[in-house]
Amino acid sequence: MEFTYETVAFFIFALTTLGSGIMVVTDENLFHASLYLLFSLFGVSGLFVLLVAPFLAAVQVLVYMGAIGILIIFAIMLTRGMMKMDQVYNSQRVAAAVVAVLLFIALAVTLTPIVDELEFGEDLNAELAEDPVADVTYETVNELGKVITDRNGFVLPFEVASLLLTAAMIGAIVVAREDEA
Amino acid sequence: MVPLYMYLLVAAALFCIGVFGVLSRRNAIAILMGIELMLNAVNINLVAFWRYLKPDEINGQVFAAFVFVVAAAEAAVGLALIISVYRNRNTVEAEDINLLKW
């Protein structure tokens, strides 16, 4: 791997993502953990930019950091009595850590050779190395809109997704509403 | 260009951090945050595979967008449930919420 601006940016964003991710699951103060979660999501959106998916990066910032982040912070503040527990972890934390580490090792070990097989021949690799963005259209928003509303594309899943969002919104309001009686 | 497996390794690590959070935290909101981390790891994978293997088709990004939708719905309903449970039982500890335990 060469040492380019892209690699530097990749490592910055990857370290932001993983470092804050670890803080999310280890910080004793839940409110701090939620702020670290926002940092971690920001790192992921940076990775999306590096992967030439600007629309998804913007959606990540708007929906994840904006909407879901605020939602989580609100929930934490509404349950403020639980913000600081004397015991952060349950009794199975050692087992959980072992499972997580083993899962990561398994994933890492299986990933690497599979990717070698998947990875296109040397030519395409060289091409990508020369001009990493040449093969991607920048009009992703355009294309996404077309595919999502295309009868042979994703129009049905799109409608189902909107239905799901509506149902989830109504359900959330009904569940969280205080009883009037 | 950063090789594909670097992105996959980052995503795998993020997923495992999320798994640890889900399995070990006591606060239900912290468990939900672990799930958000796992969903993000999946999204990194989807976009990375799209970018490196099929950049001329937009499908990978569409899948990632649907993951966003499901994540938003899940967070809204999950947090509403947690707030409701807190109101009724005055706790959000996953171990204390055992109404349905037989």
Image (tube, grey):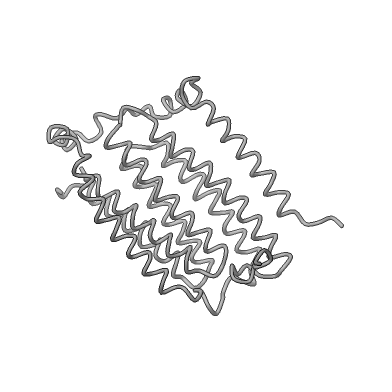
In the picture, measured across the screen, residue B3 lies left or right of residue B94, that is left
The residue depicted at 43 percent of the width and 54 percent of the height is B38
Looking at the image, is A27 positioned above or below residue A53?
below
The residue depicted at 41 percent of the width and 25 percent of the height is A143
Q: Position of residue A56 (x, y in %)?
A: 42, 39
The residue depicted at 48 percent of the width and 54 percent of the height is B36
Looking at the image, is A144 positioned above or below residue B69?
above
In the picture, measured across the screen, residue B54 lies left or right of residue B1, that is right
Give the residue furthest to the top.
Answer: A151
Q: Position of residue A23 (x, y in %)?
A: 42, 66
Looking at the image, is B18 positioned above or below residue A65?
below
Quadrant (top left/top right/bottom left/bottom right) for the C terminus of chain B: bottom right
Foreground of the two, B13 or A4: B13
Give the residue furthest to the bottom.
Answer: A86
In the picture, measured across the screen, residue B28 lies left or right of residue A10, that is right
Foreground of the two, A76 or A95: A95
Q: Position of residue B101 (x, y in %)?
A: 65, 66
The residue depicted at 35 percent of the width and 45 percent of the height is B45
